Amino acid sequence: MISQLRNLLLVALATTGIMASAGNDPDFLFKRQIKAHPAPAFEDVAGREYKFLIDATKAKGTPAEAFKVMWTQVKASATKQGFTVTEKDKNPLKIEMTTKEYFDTADHALWKQGYLIRITTKYKAGIADEKGKVTVKAIFEDPAKTIATPLEVVGVKSEEECQDNAGIGKGGQLVGYIEKGASFSVALDDLGKMTLGDFAKYMPELLKLGLSGDTKLVSNKAYSYRVRPGYVVLPGTEPCGVSMEGWSLKEDGPIFLYDFSYGYDGFTLYENPETHMQGELFMSKVLIGDLAGLALADDGKWGGSKVRIFLKRPITK
């Protein structure tokens, strides 16, 4: 009888430890989100991405060397913790290069109104593509406002997504924020001087923010080095693509920030609870847990967002 009670206590303690590890909270993040925003509030949010920021000073060597070490550590931890991680058959650590260029006024007027403009430009053999992918995002503290933002693109083919992002917040707790984005590809020359009006040709609502069309936008450019080595396998969804990315301020310059991310889409927070649960446990046990030594010392200020660090916009709440 004593032995049985002891075993029950150990099981209870282990279960409590697992639950607490997913955000230092008795409930998982997705459960907290559902409680705060019952259905159908998030019905249009059909994807989730988990983001873990990595201190570049702790990732030694070139980007290629750093990616190899980080990927090896993730695979070893995943096996230890009982998760399945698979690797691509061919050239899993092939590096893709792009630039990520963010546009706003000098006083961050667009960000203050919940908007973010980005141009992603691909490079092949060191030569930039003539076309860029423009993404306009809505990111408000009020998720309902984010979801309701139109982001309507005119004149060109576009695609839209609305996803939940999970990262480390203050106190080491998992936090989530909703972002909605619309993307379209155009020749960079078609954006003229890249004023607000040049972007508003494709998204007219940008001229409803109280700024004139000739408002000059300031560019902040990061050079991105990225690998997509494999997948995190979670129940209830297709294998989740892994991305590891490093940013520098100039081509072939030193990396100032790395991250590791994975995610899935096609269903909401109200569906597939086991997927969300295991996704959070992978984050808490493998990344926040075994790979804690790679994390930024002040990672709780950024919620997993590289952009917040790059543009110096910490979480305020």
Image: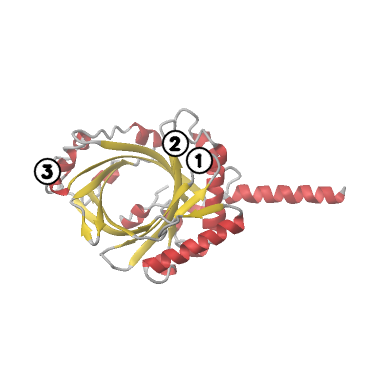
Q: Earlier in the sequence, mark 1 or mark 3?
A: 3
Residue that carries the numbered disc 2 in the rendered image: 266
Residue that carries the numbered disc 3 in the rendered image: 214
Q: Is residue 194 above or below residue 45?
A: below
Extreme-right residue of the structure: 1
Residue toward you, 287 or 237: 237
Lateral position of residue 157 relative to residue 227, left or right: left
Residue toward you, 289 or 216: 289
Q: Position of residue 292 (x, y in %)?
A: 52, 61
Lateral position of residue 195 relative to residue 39, left or right: left
Q: Position of residue 258 (x, y in %)?
A: 39, 60
The residues bearing labels 2 and 1 have C-alpha atoms spaced at a distance of 9 Å
Tell me the SS state at disc 2. Answer: loop
Bin the neighbour count of mark 3 within 10 Å (Cα to Cα): few under 14, some 14-19, many 20 and up: few
Q: Amino acid at mark 1?
A: Thr
Bin the neighbour count of mark 1 within 10 Å (Cα to Cα): few under 14, some 14-19, many 20 and up: some
